[in-house]
Image (cartoon, rainbow, N blue to C red):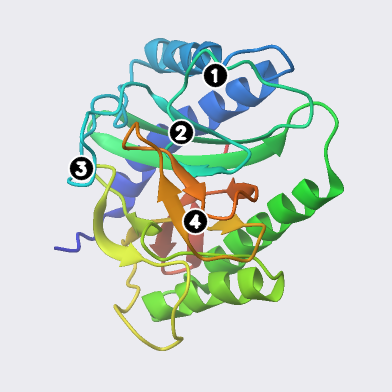
């Protein structure tokens, strides 16, 4: 069921989105060579505590997962594309880190992700991340009232394919509201003019994730959560929660 939000509800979601933005900024500022992924998870937990917010990630267990998710961030390193569980792994010079985070505040949820390099960046990683960010911007620009979900999906896919990257539609964007994952699904590739019509009040997460090797396949770690590129190439994941308004798309997970 697709739920449309009122302007006041979108403003309440904006408050949750700012918590997400603050946490991601804090995690990025703390990330450095020698810092563990579990330390970054604690940074995000502190932002949640200070805001009086809760985590939609912690103890989340969708149908595909054999165990509940044990953290408040997904921390995916190098060939890990999505859903990485924070461990005691210490970041190394040149790592590509993707961090996904959500927050629920006063009953409303925000969800966003960033990717960045730790220490000395490989130019190929910089290009991969930049292309994912370009795809995110293209998807947001396509989220106009009266457009279709397929227009958003096609905009994302066109950027990824032009870059020569692999992408997969098993996991992608989604509706956001009282919970983290709601209808509709927003795949990272599709046909323009198809799917649900975007109406004012619809709030969706738009989240491109690309794999550098060009292979669309992925594999799942024994932990049941971490998704890695099948060919071992590096991956990048970026995301924003976006409201469709009469005046156009409004990003809710920015400061």
Residue 62: mark in rendering: 3
Q: Are marks 4 and 2 in contact (CB under 8 Å)?
A: no
Q: Residues within 10 Å of mark 2 (few under 14, many from 20)?
A: many
Residue 111 vs residue 63, the one in the foreground: 63
**Residue 222 x, y percent position in the rendering:** 35, 34
Q: Which residue is mark 1?
A: 37
Can you tell which quarter of the image residue 13 is in? top left
Residue 16 vs residue 225, the one in the foreground: 225
Kind of element beneath mark 3: loop
Q: Is residue 242 above or below residue 103?
A: below
Residue lying at 64% horizontally and 65% vertically, measured from the top left: 165
Q: Are marks 4 and 1 in contact (CB under 8 Å)?
A: no
Q: Are marks 1 and 2 in contact (CB under 8 Å)?
A: yes
**Residue 78 x, y percent position in the rendering:** 63, 39
Residue 250: mark in rendering: 4
Q: Which residue is mark 2?
A: 84
**Residue 228 x, y percent position in the rendering:** 50, 46
Work out how far the residue at label 1 is from the one at label 2, CA to CA, in angstroms. Answer: 10 Å
């Amino acid at each position: 069921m697709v739920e449309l939000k009122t302007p006041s509800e979108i403003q309440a979601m904006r408050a949750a989105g700012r918590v997400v933005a603050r946490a991601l900024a804090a995690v990025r500022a703390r990330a450095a060579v020698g810092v563990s992924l579990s330390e970054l998870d604690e940074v995000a937990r502190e932002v949640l505590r200070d805001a009086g917010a809760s985590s939609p990630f912690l103890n989340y267990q969708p149908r595909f997962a054999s165990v509940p998710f044990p953290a408040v961030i997904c921390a995916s390193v190098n060939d890990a594309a999505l859903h990485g569980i924070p461990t005691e792994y210490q970041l190394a010079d040149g790592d590509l880190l993707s961090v996904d985070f959500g927050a629920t505040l006063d009953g409303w949820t925000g969800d966003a992700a960033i990717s960045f390099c730790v220490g000395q960046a490989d130019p190929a990683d910089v290009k991969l991340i930049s292309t994912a960010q370009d795809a995110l911007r293209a998807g947001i620009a396509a989220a106009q009232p009266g457009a279709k979900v397929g227009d958003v999906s096609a905009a994302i896919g066109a950027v990824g394919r032009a870059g020569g990257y692999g992408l997969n539609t098993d996991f992608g964007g989604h509706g956001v509201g009282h919970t983290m994952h709601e209808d509709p699904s927003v795949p990272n590739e599709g046909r323009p003019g198809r799917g649900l019509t975007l109406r004012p009040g619809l709030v969706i997460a738009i989240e491109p994730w690309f794999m550098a090797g060009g292979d669309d396949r992925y594999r799942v770690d024994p932990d049941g959560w971490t998704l890695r590129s099948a060919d071992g190439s590096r991956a990048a994941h970026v995301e924003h929660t976006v409201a469709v308004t009469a005046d156009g798309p409004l990003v809710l997970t920015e400061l």
